Amino acid sequence: MNGSKHNPLCSGASPEKVTSDLELLVDFQEQGVSLKELRQMIEERLLPHFMQYDKPEFQSLFNFFPEKAANFGAKIAIDYNQGTTNWQVSPGAVMLEELCCQSLCRLFGLSQEADATFMYCGTYSNQSALYLALHWTAEQHGFDFAKKGIQGFEDPTRLVAITSREAHFSLKHALRIMGLGEQSLVTLPVDENYRIDIKNIEEILKELQDIYDVFCFVATAGTTSSGSVDPILPIVKICKEAGIWFHVDGAYGLAYSLVPEKRHLFSGIEQADSITWDPHKQFGVPIPNSLLFVRRREDLYRSAVYGDYWNRREDPEPNPGLKSPPSTRPLSALPLVTSIRYLGMEKIIQRLHAPLVAIKTVYENFLHSQAIELCHEPDLGILCFRVTPEGFPKKQLDQLQQSVYDKTKVEGKRSISLTKIDNKIVLRLVIINEDITAEDIMETISYIRALANEF
């Protein structure tokens, strides 16, 4: 679906215009319409407002058009609409998911005792990981968290999870849902490259444990703002000594552990108690497609709920629905399996490697530039920077970045993103697509600089 570079990535229409175009689609009437008429409505009224992820000008987020073999697998999954939570609904779908999870554990170098379950998204995977951490911690306190919940703890207000201040917002969501609230998330300082600052971390943890009951330490393997990878191995050792569940949010970054040049960043990840991963990002498989890995297979069953007609305790067959909360979910394993088998790992690693090279090349090109302020040295495929035109007032640089970002949205020619680092507004490029070159990124930065000069 690659189109001309002169075509917009998206319509750029206002919410009012999009609403106007789509109202006819949701005008549910007594009589239906033909598929031909429906197709025309979709093409004229909906598709223009879709974002074209496959174009080289899309450099903003983690979205990807489906890889063709993944699309093939997804079509089969939709055609047969197979559930995967229970052997009764589909022995083939259930067994494929089970085998896929085992193969993925081997692919990422996890132990023979490890296992995984498919989830709807990385947010749900992180939420489930925090639940498992609380359940495991309750067990150390001598009670079943599934039965007593947070009331089983002597003082639930002491319960906290700790993570980087650059961690994903899904951790706040998880703590809200579990009834602990955002006050139960303690954030740690980061170094100059936005990784958890390992200096003095043992002293900080000891001070926290004097005040709180730390039930989980979350590291991020590829933060969403800058793509930074927290120092996993030192944190593993600290958590083992302190008796704390260690979770790694690798939703974005875990895939890059397969790239030989980046493997060192993920050293020790096989010792984490749980890991999140989103194949729908770099692997280009259709959403929903996320996984939660655990180091000990039995830990997944901490969330198991048994029924009289469904997922019975005495059922001898595998029932993936016992491993994670959804009682109905799609066959997400199939498009991932078809894509990996079609491409092969050699090609997949090449696809993963290309964006990393492109980002590194651009970073090095601007390392000594006065017109671009680089905000970090990229660990993976994300680059954050600020445009700094000569003579532009420093106090107004935040507003300049915001204005440039707003203008790109209106024009729709290129898609970039915005974030905040060190309390500064910065521009952010995310490269997922293997076809995006350093030249494409340089064109985007040239475009951004031209916009900046208009203000």
Image: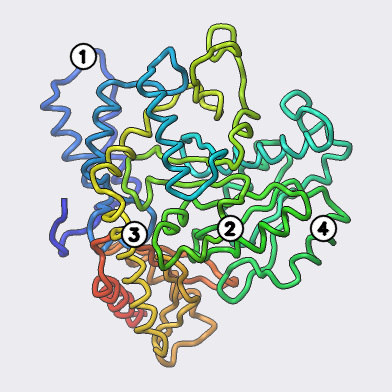
The reply to whether the C-beta atoms of the residues labelled 1 and 4 are less than 8 Å apart is no
- Mark 3 or 4, which is nearer the eye? 3
Mark 4 residue element = helix
- Front-lying residue, 383 or 39: 383
Circle nearer the N terminus (4, 2): 4
* Side of 311 relative to 237 (left or right): left
**Identity of the amino acid at label 1?**
Gln
Residue drawn at (44%, 30%), measured in percent from left and top?
98
Residue ID for mark 1: 31
Tag 4: amino acid:
Leu
Q: Earlier in the sequence, mark 1 or mark 4?
A: 1
Q: Which residue is mark 2?
A: 268
Q: Earlier in the sequence, mark 2 or mark 3?
A: 2
Q: Which residue is mark 3?
A: 352
The CA span between labels 1 and 2 is 60 Å
Q: At x 61% / y 50%, what residue is drawn?
A: 272
**Residue 388, how many percent across, how many down?**
43, 84
* Disc 2 residue type (three-letter): Gly
Mark 3 neighbour class, 10 Å CA radius: few under 14, some 14 to 19, many 20 or more: many
Disc 3 or 1, which lies upstream in sequence?
1
